[in-house]
Image (cartoon, rainbow, N blue to C red):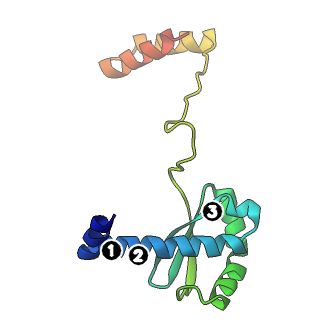
């Protein structure tokens, strides 16, 4: 363990990263205590830079709730003298880590027999081979 600590102290970049993580952890703890419990479950501290606290939610709906509570939260954080916070920015997490699947499932849509016939007739009258093949493939799906 001592060797790890010596290595960390000797590496300025690594030391800065660890220090930033510690600051973010403390901010996260403080922010969560000031948010409603239901909102806190869908929110996290994403970053803190140049006096700007960046908060992230897992959906646009929760982002609206967070924006609504934002001014009150900022006042409470300033009163608690939290790391010189000047303002709060909000964002939606684009790739939430708590999803069960990384790729959205595509819904299969069944074609009516009339639609299928129309697509196949159209494909047989098209000269572009790429488009024709795509329409034939689509029209033959069941």
Distance, label 2 to label 1, CA atoms, is 6 Å
Tell me if residue 45 comes above or below residue 81 in the rendering: above
The residue carrying pointer 1 sits among few (fewer than 14), some (14 to 19) or many (20 or more) residues within 10 Å by Cα, namely: some
Give the position of the N terminus as an image quadrant: bottom left
Which structural element holds mark 2? Answer: helix
The residue carrying pointer 3 sits among few (fewer than 14), some (14 to 19) or many (20 or more) residues within 10 Å by Cα, namely: many
Give the position of the C terminus as an image quadrant: top right
Residue 3: in sight, yes or no? yes
At x 37% / y 15%, what residue is drawn?
Answer: 133
Is 8 positioned to the left or the right of 31 in the image?
Answer: left
Q: Are marks 3 and 1 in contact (CB under 8 Å)?
A: no
Distance, label 3 to label 2, CA atoms, is 22 Å
Mark 3 or 2, nearer chain start: 2
Please state the horizontal and vertical placement of residue 105, each as a whole percent of the image.
55, 31
Residue 128: in sight, yes or no? no
Is 97 positioned to the left or the right of 59 in the image?
Answer: left
Please state the horizontal and vertical placement of residue 29, each as a whole percent of the image.
61, 71
Q: Quadrant of residue 76?
A: bottom right
Camera-nearest residue between 84 and 104: 84
Please state the horizontal and vertical placement of residue 2, each as a whole percent of the image.
31, 68
Q: Nearer the viewer, mark 3 or mark 2?
A: 2
- The residue indicated by pointer 3 is 43
Camera-nearest residue between 112 and 7: 7
At x 54% / y 50%, what residue is drawn?
Answer: 96
- The residue indicated by pointer 2 is 19
């Amino acid at each position: 363990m001592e060797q790890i600590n010596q290595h960390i102290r000797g590496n300025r970049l690594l030391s800065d990263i660890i220090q930033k993580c510690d600051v973010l952890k403390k901010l996260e703890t403080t922010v969560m205590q000031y948010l409603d419990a239901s909102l806190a479950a869908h929110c996290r501290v994403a970053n803190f830079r140049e006096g700007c606290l960046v908060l992230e939610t897992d959906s646009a709906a929760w982002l609206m709730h967070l924006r609504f509570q934002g001014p009150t939260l900022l006042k409470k954080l300033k009163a608690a003298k939290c790391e010189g916070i000047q303002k709060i920015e909000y964002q939606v997490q684009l790739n939430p880590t708590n999803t069960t699947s990384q790729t959205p499932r595509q819904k299969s849509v069944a074609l009516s027999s009339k639609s299928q016939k129309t697509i196949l007739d159209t494909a047989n009258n098209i000269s572009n081979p790429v488009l024709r093949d795509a329409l034939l493939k689509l029209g033959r799906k069941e």
